[in-house]
Image: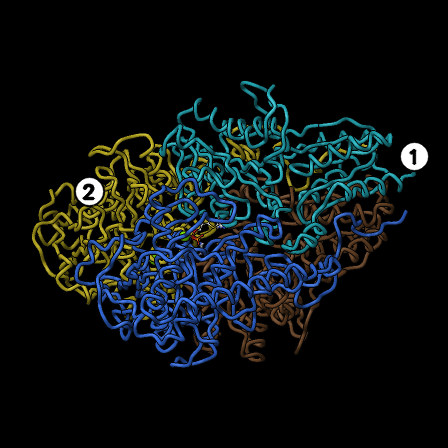
Chain colours: A blue, B yellow, C brown, D cyan
Amino acid sequence: MAVPQKRSGRTPRARAATAPASAPSVRPGAPKRRRSGAATPSGPSGPPAPGTDASGDTGTIPSVSSGLAAEPPQVLADYYRQMVLVRVFEQRAAEMYTRAKIGGYCHLNLGEEATVVGLMAALERTDYLFTTYREHGYALCRGIDPGRVMAELFGKATGVSGGWGGSMHLFDTDARLLGGYGIVGGQIPPATGAALAIAYRSDPGDEAEAVMCLMGDGTTNIGAFHESLNLAAIWNLPIVYVVVNNGLGMGTTVQAASGEPDLYRRGGAYRIPGVRVDGDDVIAVRDAARQALHSARAERQPMLVEAVSSRLRGHSVVDPARYRSPEDTERARRLDPVPTLRSHLIETGILDLAAVTKIEAEVEDVVTAAVTFADESPPPAVADLFAHAYATPVPNTPHRLPADALMVSEP
Amino acid sequence: MAVPQKRSGRTPRARAATAPASAPSVRPGAPKRRRSGAATPSGPSGPPAPGTDASGDTGTIPSVSSGLAAEPPQVLADYYRQMVLVRVFEQRAAEMYTRAKIGGYCHLNLGEEATVVGLMAALERTDYLFTTYREHGYALCRGIDPGRVMAELFGKATGVSGGWGGSMHLFDTDARLLGGYGIVGGQIPPATGAALAIAYRSDPGDEAEAVMCLMGDGTTNIGAFHESLNLAAIWNLPIVYVVVNNGLGMGTTVQAASGEPDLYRRGGAYRIPGVRVDGDDVIAVRDAARQALHSARAERQPMLVEAVSSRLRGHSVVDPARYRSPEDTERARRLDPVPTLRSHLIETGILDLAAVTKIEAEVEDVVTAAVTFADESPPPAVADLFAHAYATPVPNTPHRLPADALMVSEP
Amino acid sequence: MTEMSYRQALHDTLRAEMLRDESVFLLGEEIGIFEGSYKITAGLLQEFGPRRVRDTPISEEGFVGAAVGAAMLGLRPVVELMTINFSLLAIDQIVNHAAKIHAMFGGQAAVPMVIRTPGGGGQQLGATHSQNIEVYYAHVPGLKVVAPSTPADAKGLLTASIRDDDPVLVVENLALYNTKGDVPDGDHVTEIGTAAVTKEGTDLTVVAYSRAAAIALDVAHRLEDEHISVEVVDLRSLRPLDRETICASVRKTTRAVVIEDDWLSYGIGAEVAATIQEGAFYHLDAPVRRVAAAEVPLPYAKSLEHAALPHAGDLLAAIHETLDATGFAP
Amino acid sequence: MTEMSYRQALHDTLRAEMLRDESVFLLGEEIGIFEGSYKITAGLLQEFGPRRVRDTPISEEGFVGAAVGAAMLGLRPVVELMTINFSLLAIDQIVNHAAKIHAMFGGQAAVPMVIRTPGGGGQQLGATHSQNIEVYYAHVPGLKVVAPSTPADAKGLLTASIRDDDPVLVVENLALYNTKGDVPDGDHVTEIGTAAVTKEGTDLTVVAYSRAAAIALDVAHRLEDEHISVEVVDLRSLRPLDRETICASVRKTTRAVVIEDDWLSYGIGAEVAATIQEGAFYHLDAPVRRVAAAEVPLPYAKSLEHAALPHAGDLLAAIHETLDATGFAP
Ligand SMILES: Cc1ncc(C[n+]2csc(CCOP(=O)(O)OP(=O)(O)O)c2C)c(N)n1
Ligand SMILES: Cc1ncc(C[n+]2csc(CCOP(=O)(O)OP(=O)(O)O)c2C)c(N)n1
Ligand SMILES: [Mg+2]
Ligand SMILES: [Mg+2]
């Protein structure tokens, strides 16, 4: 089992910041401030999260505890199980990549487990999710069978996308996971359009559908971000944009890439309220996302949530991340949400060591079974190469293999 | 002479607003507030300018007078002359379009004369200007011979762009007018790159070069705006982005198009300070632009200036603007900066009626001469069709007319 | 049959499909209050309201991508891009998203959207506003691309496109909007993927699409007087391309000329000529000639613009030279 | 001559040009601290500092456009686009700005910039990351497009591109970066606009570029054993296209096969085949065959990806069929 050893207790960071002094820029009826659900306020602890620059925010940023204490043990156990599932799945994926079972690019959620689990816990089954190429964990926590996810990474016919998508392009209609996307920012306009479709067809309300659109910190610098948030704002769409801020694009820091490195504030250019949350705190993330989703579904107020966490490894499996300083790497390890939650559960007596170990062992089995399933599954049949070329067949669609003559011409 | 009749005196609006409460989002060393140069503060008068929503800005928006009183008469006379030049030139252009002397799209600066003159007055000869397809006035006020501008509209070889560009694509190396551009937002990245070239080659300082990049209000919604401002911010480029807010894209209002209709605030997403100025007040515009240029050249602090004015006619010459309400049209007429300045000059005794009339008559002659020059100039020679295909000749560049065979093939 | 303009045919088709199917809606810049840059959508905002006729900001990548997402949820957005030139701002959403989503996700999602957009030069709009870059889209598996040249096809192909479950680019042409023709009444669907022989002939085949197909038909009729029998193939569908109809015609006539408004190198005509030389090799009596625009950014000046674009006279010259090369005498 | 990889040749050329000319600078995503996605720029940030080696945010339209503006002021930016797929985000700046500015403003401004970017499939990167869309740029007057297939040409063409006053797209290929070859020492400039006959032959001409040109050369050498003499034309320059070298070869060999990594319809091969049928019509003994990728969004699964992309075996098959069609016996 690959979860790092229990370490000396660390108070989980938990902080939510609203876009500052944005009162005049919030539309009438829109909430001016949001807090993560937890009740007891507490100051931020640990070093400032990447991208954090709260110096000018004096008095405007409420700091709240993560509310771990208020959660039923069963819920926490379940979150822990999911976080471990993501952790182990990703570690195994890295291993399978090295063994050439997985090809192409492979980006892992290692270090982002609390964000992944918290965000997915906030979604309702009826909500839609658009995400990036770094999305294995989201698929798993959305309830998709790990075997089908691993099979997709293996390029097998039993994979969620039938082997057509690979690691970067997981999709599942039933789970309303409407895709991982490999073009940075490419998912943002379609996600916005999905929210448009919801608004087109139904009324706002507590039970209404909403869209969650994930993106990385580096992605906030691309034009599609700007255009999409603006559309969501003027059309009042039920969508929550989530910036998963792991501090880095590939090797480029948020500070180097973004004129406004407090990314949650970037919604201000569209009067979209923003909230920053500690991405290593699963409860804080869940609560912030839930509240944002509530605004989206009940008020058609698009929202921006920034979850700050760290990337434990390189940008993708093959990146040794030599550009990272030892301090930065050490910091990421120290903030690692999986052992942190583990320690917390045990120390607070929510779960005993045996229960935690049991969860870990079960997850281990699940992932092993997923690998076996993937390995034993058949690849897609070459005969099906043109099976998904078009949804509506029309005459003259090309069905030609590379060596085929275009057409027969007889002398 | 086409300048509307003198009307009862109207106190010129003059107002400059800084991005609100942006203290925490301004980089160290950057000025936190800017004011237009004029000394005597006075409240805004007249109806709110299009796109204005200052309701939440209580206490943070300094309102300043236009400072007309403080200007030397000769300067004001010169500005008036330039405004009339733009006015008459544009009216004549419209007429020439109707007479089919001008083709394609033709967008006029009618109603924006104070903005045009104020902005150009703020530029130094060494500064670079990138603008849009609505740029005749800027070319004129940058000192380019009206004959060469009109000749370009006529598609003549003597035109500023040799007849290749037309109304939308004026360019003049000597005037450092680096182009009118027809793709909405297309000019913003190159303008940013020009500022990069300046920063690459020279140090900041009071005499340093800077770039001014103009755009319309509707243009702030395109991705290139976002990407470019962000680049300017992280690279500290000497550039001033000017949003010429005439309240409308083609028929779409700022409110309908922009989640944050206070466009000067949109720099906040990059920590670029913004200032809004009354675009009908030539002095206020000039002073705001000058100060912004100073920050750009001396501190390498990119700036955003929003100048609010009105479009007197349709989007282009052929647009009857049926979508505009009579009130809106009437409002635009009321705010018309040319007769407003005329009245002011006469009423305050800065110029007497004879002087004003003389200016108008002279301008009339200049424009008539420009039309004659354009009309009598030769079109570009068809033999020169491939003259500008490439700057560096290489083998096998195509020089084929539509009916030419690709190559000779002999049996 | 009713005689109407190409513009009217497009307008009426949009209206009919919106009435027929609640999931069809329009979005684009200035299509509502402004009634469309070229007035195709005139009156529709008034009739259907802002939910069905949605004005967008100037955000091509954003709203084309939004249409992709809306289509994934089963709506049928019909996007207007003001001109095809601006499609370059949205091409990532078209090529990397709309075209890929169905296959890349293993067939789970469809993207039933339409993009309508006019191309074409000759209006003195200058280099950036006069392009014909439909070949960019015709190149891409996952997309369908049609280019009607008549009011009837405008109706038939737009109807087919809206009802199709794949993303379809409908290429219109500035120079065709005011042209008139008979349009079938009632439901009229033209099958995507099929070319039309718009005039039969025996001596030479002209292959064209969009505005050039109208020129070709005109020239072919004029040549009747000279006793030259030209067959005209109007491609109508650029992807899929109906190679068999093209080659069958050339196998019969033994000679071919392709005309298009776009630049010659790597244009639509290149694929057509390459197809003919492969599919009618043994029947071809002369090289396939291509008539296309001069390869320069299109100049504004009328004289230069005219010289750079293909006209009927250019097609006539190429036809005559091709006939002469084979010793043809009428 | 020094033997080195294609990657090393590119790296060394960038370095040499930066040393030679202060106005040459690099910009792109992750080219500095990260040393480039494919490590072409490794070490250059350290050597030249952040002024000359500029990391950009993920803003393709923004920084490509910034390069356009910097070039207008006389700098010589060399942009790295991480892969050609992402060029679609910047294509408006490339096609509507970089390519147009010189002509549209009557020759007053030049845009001496270079965009380097790799294309190519076969790495299991999936549908959006495996494209070969250089034909988009090759289509556009005002641009120049080169695609080196050897380390020597990588040096020669990149050098020429940097020194050229027009915007040049240098198409690299993921599958070529590790290939090795002899590279001339010192100044080495390959003229843009010229193709190369990389192997002489008498029986059949294979036309190719980039990775496919390497395959073609390999196949041609293998066929020597079967006493089939294949001539290989490596296009090197896609715009301008050296039609004369292609046609001269085919006039001699009388048969031609074109191979490319891109989709068949409207690909580079279409223009080549169309050119050959026009410029060597009376010499051609068989249709020009095209070997190209299957027309689907490229699947991730290894088996499907392999089936969709052209390989040496496909080229061999097309060569043999073409020879057979003309009754050729070695
Ligand atoms: C348009 C585009 N440009 C560049 C890339 C290459 N690329 C892939 S991931 C990435 C970094 C993204 O950083 P971020 O948004 O922070 O997400 P993270 O990978 O950290 O989750 C880059 C530059 C791409 N896929 N698409
Ligand atoms: C990318 C792009 N999309 C659309 C257009 C068509 N278009 C030309 S001007 C215009 C409105 C621009 O409005 P604004 O930015 O406010 O400038 P204004 O015309 O008012 O000066 C539009 C939509 C274009 N030229 N380019
Ligand atoms: Mg990141
Ligand atoms: Mg405007």
Q: Tell us which disc is closer to us: 1 or 2.
A: 1
Residue C5 in the image: state x and y as whole percent: 60, 67
Residue B394: image quadrant is: top right
Badge 2: how crowded within 10 Å, few (<14), some, or many (20+)? few
Residue at left offset 64%, top offset 29%: D194
* Number of numbered callouts drawn: 2
Residue C46: image quadrant is: bottom left
- Confirm or reject: label 1 Cβ below 8 Å from ligand 1: no
Q: Nearer the viewer, residue C43 or D218?
A: D218
Label 2 sits on residue: B78
| D31 w.r.t. B349: above or below | above
Which amino acid does the dot numbered 1 rest on?
Ala
Q: Nearer the viewer, residue C306 or D47?
A: D47
The answer to whether any part of residue A173 appears in the image is yes
| C17 w.r.t. A356: above or below | below
The outermost residue toward the front is A354
Callout 1: chain: D
Left or right of A16 on screen, residue D36: right
Q: Which mark is residue A233?
A: none
Label 1 sits on residue: D329
Which amino acid does the dot numbered 2 rest on?
Asp
Badge 1: how crowded within 10 Å, few (<14), some, or many (20+)? few
Residue at left offset 69%, top offset 35%: D213
Residue A101 in the image: state x and y as whole percent: 62, 52
Q: Nearer the viewer, residue B215 or C320?
A: B215
The answer to whether any part of residue C132 appears in the image is no
Tag 2 secondary structure: helix
3D distance between C-alphas at marks 1 and 2: 87 Å
Residue at left offset 74%, top offset 64%: A395
